[in-house]
Amino acid sequence: MVRFATGLFALFTLALWGYLAWLFPWPAIAFMIGAPLFAIVVWALFRAPQAIIATDAVGKAIVEIAVMGAATAAWFQLGYPIVGVVFALVAAVVGVLTFRREARAD
């Protein structure tokens, strides 16, 4: 449940960044839709439980770090470093716990 909420918050963060980071409306709308959509596609290809492209634990970790790291960087760029640090800590703990659970299942 916490992992799902962390993922949704990351997608919300990427959409918010896409909207607020641009001065003109059309790039803002394109990035508001495109940034989370790109993250969803990459996650579905490599990280989802039934991923289209099977990867090892390191590949899955790289994808998760990239998506969560992008959301963390977005908070820093938007001027909310405390939210970025808190999100990074929560995402790191959830990622480590998920990795340990998946390693134990294999």
Image: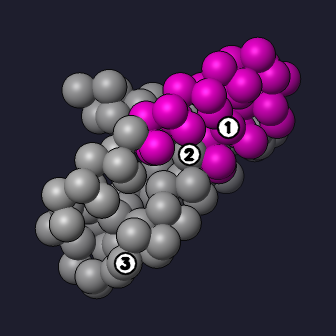
Rounded to the nearest whole Å, what is the CA distance between mark 3 and mark 1?
24 Å
Q: Residues within 10 Å of mark 3 (few under 14, many from 20)?
A: few
Is 64 situated above or below 3? below
**Location of residue 80 by image quarter:** top right
User: How dense is the environment of label 2, judged by Cα within 10 Å: few (below 14), some, or many (20 and up)?
Assistant: many
Residue displayed at 28% across by 83% down: 53
Vertical comparison of 27 with 52: above or below: above
Q: Secondary structure at mark 2?
A: helix
> In the image, which disc is placed on residue 56?
3
Location of mark 2 (residue): 68
Q: Amino acid at mark 3?
A: Asp
* Lower position in the chain sequence, tag 3 or tag 1: 3
Secondary element at image label 1: helix
Q: Which residues are magenta?
A: 69-96
* Residue situated in front as seen by the camera: 38 or 88: 88
- Going by the numbered disc 1, the residue's amino acid type is Thr
Q: Quadrant of the N terminus?
A: top left
- Front disc: 2 or 3: 3
Residue at numbered disc 1? 72
State which mark lies toward you, 3 or 1: 3
